Every structure is written in C-alpha cells, then in structure tokens.
Image: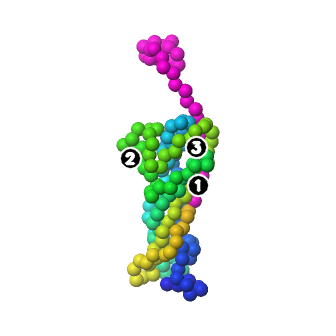
Amino acid sequence: MTNDAGAPLTITDVAQFAPAPVTTAAEPGGVGVAGLPMNFVAATTAQTRSGTLLGRPITVRFTPARVDFVYGDGESRTSTDGGESWATLGQASFTPTPTSHTYRTRGTYPAHATVRYTAEVDIGGGWFPVPGELAIDGSVQQVRVYEADTALVARTCTEQLAAPGC
C-alpha cells in the first residue's frame, strides 16, 4: 500500500490510529524517599486499531518497542518494556529494579514515560511492517520525594513508651 504521494506507507501515515498514552505509576504511591529507589511502571501492550486510510479499510497493530522513562530531575532511562511492580517482581519496596530511579534531593518531580511503538498494517492480505517508530508521550505524574532520618535507640516503643520517637 502506498500513500497519496505514491510512496510506501510510513509511520506518519498511520499515526492517526495511535494508541492512547500510557499512565506511569510510581511506587510506592507516587511518594519516595531521597536516596532510596522509587519504582516506575508503564503498562504497555500491543494494540490494534481499525479504520479507513486512503479510502481503504485498514487494521494497524502497534507493538511497544521500548519505553523512555523521564524522571523529571534531568535523568532518564530506556527500557525494553514498561517495568513491573515490586510485588510482581517479588521484591521488597525501595529496592532497585530495571526501571527504578533514586532521587538525590527532596522535591516534586514531573515524571512520565514515552512509549515508542513499531507498526504493522493489514489491508486484507496479511501483516506487513511500516518503517519507523511512533513515540507517544504519557501523562505527567508529579512525584513527591521526602527526606527521612533514622536514629538508633536502646529500646523499642513497645518496650518503653517514652523512648525517643515513640
């Protein structure tokens, strides 16, 4: 299939069928501690859309190729997938994951994920690839990062109700 100019279809030609932007989840609950990892997850899946292009019925399948996590503090990371929650990974909270990020200072940071999709089209004779990638920016999530201090004490609050920090 060719576009109006007689050239093969490009990713720009099928962009009108683009998947919806993903929402990025930041564990735990969008709140982190400076110096400890926060885990970021963007639920990505292959998506199929149908419609009409150049007067012909078409089906477009978008497959996530990679995810760019933008953490809002000048740092970013690219992953081959959208990451997984700590629970799914069987990990404790505040442990590093392939999509986690450690903020150095407290503050509020605008984090989001950009999913880069490849596309295939079917006009009735089977799937064929469309050159290029389509980048879809996810919505920005404000993550709050706090500072935490710890102190060693001689007794727990159960042992001594008047202990420091109880």
Q: Which mark is residue 88?
A: 2
Q: What residue type is labelled 3?
A: Val
> Splitting the image into 4 quarters, where does residue 10 fall?
bottom right
| Secondary structure beneath label 1 | loop
Q: Which residue is drawn at 50% across and 58% down?
A: 67
Residue 64 to residue 11: above or below: above
Residue 33: x %, y % from top left: 54, 36
**Viewer can see residue 91:** yes
Stretch in magenta: 137-166
Q: Residue at x 58, y 35 (%)?
A: 146
Give the labeled residue for mark 3: 143
Q: Which of marks 3 and 2 is nearer the N terminus?
A: 2
Q: Give the main secondary structure, helix, strand or loop, of the magenta stretch.
A: loop
Residue 137 to residue 58: above or below: above
Q: Does the magenta stretch include residue 132?
A: no
> Splitting the image into 4 quarters, where does residue 3 fall?
bottom right
Residue 62: x %, y % from top left: 47, 68
Residue 137: x %, y % from top left: 57, 59
76 vs 139, nearest the viewer: 76
35 vs 57, nearest the viewer: 35
Q: Is residue 163 magenta?
A: yes
Residue 35: x %, y % from top left: 53, 36
Give the labeled residue for mark 1: 139
